[in-house]
Image (spheres, rainbow, N blue to C red):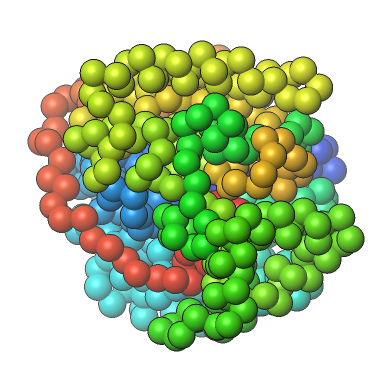
């Protein structure tokens, strides 16, 4: 392919951080990525709260905090019910939409939370959380991409063995690079955004497996090299949404704590808020669906047992002691387990954690929630009491669980702050694993030995970039205004970040208010199952 007119290339590496990259750089395993870091300015990229994919990538590509774009986790709530978020949940202009207003063209490949896409001058193939065959922009683009490069998938097939998993990770990376190069050749964009997600997935699936991590990163490096050769961008920016690292602390089960404090009420026998469990994910992975069916005798029996106090949590602790818990999780239908599970009774509780990814506690406020129990005149006192109680939580070895507990206004501002949890809880050094599950005890072993950390990476190299500038204070919100400035486009005056000193600041301007339109629900149980597999939905 001929070289394009690409001016700025943004490369997104989910969970990328120096603690992972530096050993690979030292081994000479990533020559193309290392060349960007060595030729340009680099630094840590502080993520936001919460530092998780569905909220952090929209913050990166809009330049605003979640209180302005409206996405705080994988789930969007309507009362006590929920759906998985999608692009219509993001209520602020993406940077490629702002570029479109200035007559610049973009190609965007595999960026999370971009399905269904809005129209702009260019092409977009959605990434994480999209269905397997997503709607692309322009319509029909996915068929063109598949024909051109010999197939394209958003996710690897489910139910693979370990060797096939890693082969598919590498294949997915290749598809991202080939799709981007094909579209860059077709659209000749001014701006390109290419994201790699499996750099995060491999840690959730295979923590501590350095060989698999290296295989994934080498595949990313190969594709980056091919894109740089074919597209020859003037400026390259590499950024991640958060970091990744080992967890040596505890799993803190916040709803067990809140129950002991008198805030959470529970219900047994499958009558609480519907939840998506890992077992449900396992069933869908194997091709099964819930469907409409009569409750089995076992399910009804366990439901009655739960009401009598014989819950699946108690059964699970007993199975764990004899080493049978994983076997049962693989073979017992999810509905059976759910029927025996003690759940948070959301309508009758005063406060609860509804989604661990949100990093916070929600108050069941009258007038806001369908069956609120906390009167508005008690909201401040209840919230202050929750802050005090959570600030005092210590692990069994005496370590503080949270480095910060504060009202949501300390972290978010904007028109969608009401969507945030009322009390924000920041785990201490992100070394304590938060869980919303009721397990009968407040603390346990983290279910994942690796998970998200606050600091990611940023690097910029190319035309006009001073490699010696200090990027020590770079923040996730700075990425979008930096990209815009690299293309001589003013940032939005609603953005929370500023252009990094690697580019000249061209100022800001007022852009029209974002017309959110109607939120679209994308029903896709397979996406939900994948999120459960990775521990994002409990």
Residue ID at (36%, 14%): 381
Any part of residue 405 in sight? yes
Residue 313 percent coordinates (x, y): 67, 54
Q: Is residue 520 above or below residue 408?
A: below
Quick one: which residue is furthest to the front in this view?
A: 308
Q: Considering depth in this image, is 354 or 340 the residue closer to the camera? A: 340
- Quarter holding the C terminus is bottom right
> Looking at the rendering, which quadrant does residue 523 occupy?
bottom left
Residue ID at (69%, 39%): 441
Residue 257 percent coordinates (x, y): 59, 32
Residue 134 percent coordinates (x, y): 36, 71
Q: Is residue 195 left or right of residue 452?
A: left
Q: Considering depth in this image, is 82 or 298 the residue closer to the camera? A: 298
Residue ID at (50%, 33%): 359
Q: Is residue 56 left or right of residue 40?
A: left
Residue ID at (29%, 19%): 378
Q: Considering depth in this image, is 67 or 37 the residue closer to the camera? A: 67
Any part of residue 145 in sight? no
Residue 129 percent coordinates (x, y): 44, 60
Q: Is residue 251 above or below residue 32?
A: above
């Amino acid at each position: 392919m001929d070289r394009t007119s690409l001016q700025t290339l943004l490369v997104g590496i989910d969970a990328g951080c120096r603690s992972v990259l530096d050993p690979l750089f030292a081994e000479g395993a990533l020559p193309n990525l290392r060349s960007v870091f060595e030729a340009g300015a680099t630094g840590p990229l502080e993520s936001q709260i919460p530092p998780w994919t569905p909220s952090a990538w929209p913050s990166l590509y809009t330049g605003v905090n979640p209180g302005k774009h409206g996405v705080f986790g994988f789930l969007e709530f309507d009362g006590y019910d929920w759906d998985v978020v999608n692009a219509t949940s993001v209520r602020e202009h993406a940077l490629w939409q702002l570029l479109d207003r200035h007559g610049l063209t973009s190609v965007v490949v595999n960026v999370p939370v971009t399905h269904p896409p809005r129209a702009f001058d260019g092409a977009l193939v959605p990434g994480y959380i999209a269905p397997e065959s997503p709607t692309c922009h322009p319509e029909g683009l996915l068929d063109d991409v598949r024909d051109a490069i010999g197939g394209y998938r958003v996710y690897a097939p489910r139910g693979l063995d370990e060797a096939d998993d890693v082969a598919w990770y590498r294949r997915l990376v290749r598809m991202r690079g080939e799709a981007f190069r094909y579209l860059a050749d077709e659209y000749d964009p001014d701006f390109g955004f290419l994201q790699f997600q499996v750099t995060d997935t491999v840690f959730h699936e295979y923590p501590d497996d350095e060989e698999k991590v290296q295989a994934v990163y080498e595949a990313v490096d190969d594709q980056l090299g091919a894109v740089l050769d074919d597209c020859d961008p003037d400026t390259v920016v590499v950024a991640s949404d958060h970091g990744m690292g080992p967890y040596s602390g505890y799993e803190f089960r916040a709803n067990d704590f809140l129950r002991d404090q008198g805030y959470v009420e529970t219900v047994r026998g499958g009558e609480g808020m519907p939840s998506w469990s890992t077992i449900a994910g396992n069933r869908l992975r194997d091709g099964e669906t819930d469907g409409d069916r009569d409750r089995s005798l076992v399910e009804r029996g366990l439901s009655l047992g739960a009401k009598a106090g014989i819950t699946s949590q108690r059964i699970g602790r007993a199975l764990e002691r004899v080493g049978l818990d994983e076997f049962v999780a693989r073979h017992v239908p999810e509905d059976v387990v759910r029927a025996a599970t003690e759940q948070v009774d959301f309508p009758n509780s005063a406060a609860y954690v509804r989604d661990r990814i949100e990093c916070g506690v929600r108050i069941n406020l009258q007038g806001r929630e369908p069956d609120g129990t906390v009167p508005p005149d008690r909201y401040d006192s209840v919230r202050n009491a929750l802050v005090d109680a959570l600030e005092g939580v210590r692990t069994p070895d005496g370590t503080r669980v949270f480095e910060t507990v504060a009202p949501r206004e300390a972290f978010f501002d904007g028109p969608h702050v009401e969507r945030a949890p009322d009390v924000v809880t920041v785990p201490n050094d992100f070394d304590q694993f938060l869980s919303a599950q009721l397990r009968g005890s407040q603390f346990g072993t983290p279910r994942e030995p690796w998970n998200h950390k606050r600091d990611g990476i940023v690097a910029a190299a190319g035309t006009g970039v001073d490699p010696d500038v200090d990027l020590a204070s770079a923040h996730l919100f700075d990425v979008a205004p930096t990209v815009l400035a690299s293309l001589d486009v003013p940032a939005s005056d609603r953005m929370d970040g500023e252009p990094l000193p690697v580019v000249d600041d061209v100022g800001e301007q007022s852009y029209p208010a974002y017309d959110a339109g109607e939120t679209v629900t994308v029903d896709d149980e397979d996406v939900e199952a994948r999120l459960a597999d990775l521990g994002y939905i409990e």
